Image: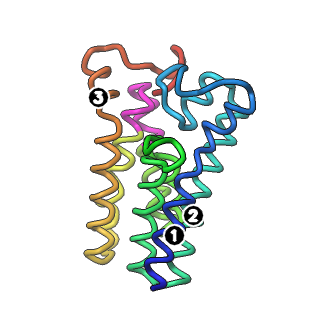
Amino acid sequence: MFTLLALIVSYLIGSIPFGFMLAKLKGLDIREYGSGNIGATNVWRNLGPLSGLAVLLLDMGKGVAAVLLGRSLGGAETELLAGLAVLSGHSWSVFLRFKGGKMIATGAGVVLAISPVLMLVALLVWLTTVAVSRYVSLGSMLAAASVPVTMAFLKLSVWHIAFGTAIAALAVYKHRSNIVRILNGTEFKVMKGGGK
């Protein structure tokens, strides 16, 4: 019963579209600008760094809140399920007709709450990739892919590694349009017009 409650609440938390809401307050439908994504990168590119940072922190907060909720209601396995639920809510929001963001910021919050070490490694992968390639999207995908690898290195449970693999696969799936643009040479680059 408590696990089901954690999943429902976590999904609803994830469904809160902070990027969409903040842009609406400024009179814009962020889905009609830039990449059309409601996440922090697109908000940053179209509304400026303060708005982008606000969305980043709020979306990360959703991930942290869901994991802590799951942990308090059911322990380690429930916190992982709550993490998947909040990411599902963010990616397929009930408030946006089951569309949403690419889950990187919310995923970062989930990973941070599970283990700060995981977050640190993923951040280093992201920073290195973006510094070399200037592709925010590529950095995001490789950072997500680093999560299950780091989990295995840290000898976390098989459930953690399965969870990490699932979110890495979801991150790549959500970035499939970015992959096409990277291969075509049309993806946005930082310092040349922004992120993803």
Do the CB atoms of the residues marked 1 and 2 lie less than 8 Å apart?
yes
| Alpha-carbon span between mark 1 and mark 3 | 29 Å
Q: Give the residue pinned by disc 1.
A: 67
Q: How many marks?
A: 3
| Alpha-carbon span between mark 1 and mark 2 | 5 Å
Percent coordinates x, y for residue 85 in the rendering: 43, 63
Asked whether 58 or 153 is in front, the reply is 58
Q: Residues within 10 Å of mark 1 (few under 14, many from 20)?
A: many
Q: Is the magenta region chiefly helix, strand or loop?
A: helix
| Residue 53 as seen in the image, left or right of residue 103 | right
Do the CB atoms of the residues marked 2 and 3 lie less than 8 Å apart?
no
User: Residue at left 54%, top 37%?
Assistant: 39
Q: Give the residue pinned by disc 3.
A: 179
SS at circle 3: helix
Q: Name the residue type under label 1.
A: Val
- Which residues fall within the magenta stretch? 126-139
Percent coordinates x, y for residue 153 in the rendering: 30, 67
**First in sequence: mark 1 or mark 3?**
1
